Image (cartoon, rainbow, N blue to C red):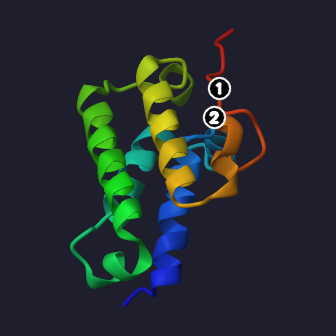
Amino acid sequence: MITPSTYRKQIIESLRLACSAKQELEYKRKVPIADVVGEMFCEWEDIYHPSVPTFNVAFSPAERTALAKSDRLSGSVADRLETTSLEQFQVTAEWARLAQGARTVLAALGDPAAQLGVAADGSRASRPRLG
C-alpha cells in the first residue's frame, strides 16, 4: 500500500507537470516517443483515486474538495481533446484552463510553486507561442 506522503508527492508531481509548459517540453525532449499530452491525462487517472483509504489520510477535506474540482476539470478537458501535439495543445484555451486548475490545487495543497503563477520549475506558467 502506498504511504500517504508518497501518494501526496505523486499527486503534486502530476499537478506540477500539468501547469508547466517548460516541464512538459522537457519531458518530451527526454522521452521523444512519448505522447506527453496523453501521458498527463493517463498519469492523473492512474494516481487520482479518492476511494482508497490512503487518500483520506494524505489530504484534508478542503484539499480533497480542490482535488475533486481538478479531476472534473481534467475530465472535461480530456473529453474535448482532439489528437494533437504537445505544442499545439499548449497554445489552446483548454491547456490554459488545465494549467490554471492545477496551479489552484497546488495552492490549496500549500505547494510554493503555485504562488504567483510560477510553475514548479521556476518558469512562468503562461502559454508558449508557436513559431
5 or 22: nearer the viewer: 5
Q: Residues within 10 Å of mark 2 (few under 14, many from 20)?
A: many
Foreground tag (1 vs 2): 1
- Residue at (43%, 77%) from the top-left corner? 58
Left or right placement of residue 26 versus residue 35 in this view: right
9 or 112: nearer the viewer: 112
Q: Residue furthest front?
A: 62
Quadrant where the N terminus sits is bottom left
Q: Residue furthest bottom?
A: 1
Residue 92 visible, this orientation: yes
Residue 87 against residue 46 in the figure, above or below:
above
Left or right placement of residue 26 versus residue 53 in this view: right
Secondary structure of the residue carrying tag 1 is loop
Residue 66 marker: none
Quadrant where the C terminus sits is top right
Secondary structure of the residue carrying tag 2 is helix
Please say if the residues under marks 1 and 2 sit with CB atoms less than 8 Å apart. Answer: yes
Reading the image, the residue beneath label 1 is: 126
Q: Residue furthest right?
A: 122
Reading the image, the residue beneath label 2 is: 21
Residue type at mark 2: give it: Ala
* Residue 106 percent coordinates (x, y): 54, 53
- Residue at (78%, 44%) from the top-left corner? 122
Query: Disc 1 and disc 2: Cα gap in Å?
Result: 7 Å
Considering only order in the chain, which callout, 2 or 1, is on the residue closer to the N terminus? 2
Residue 61 against residue 101 in the figure, above or below:
below
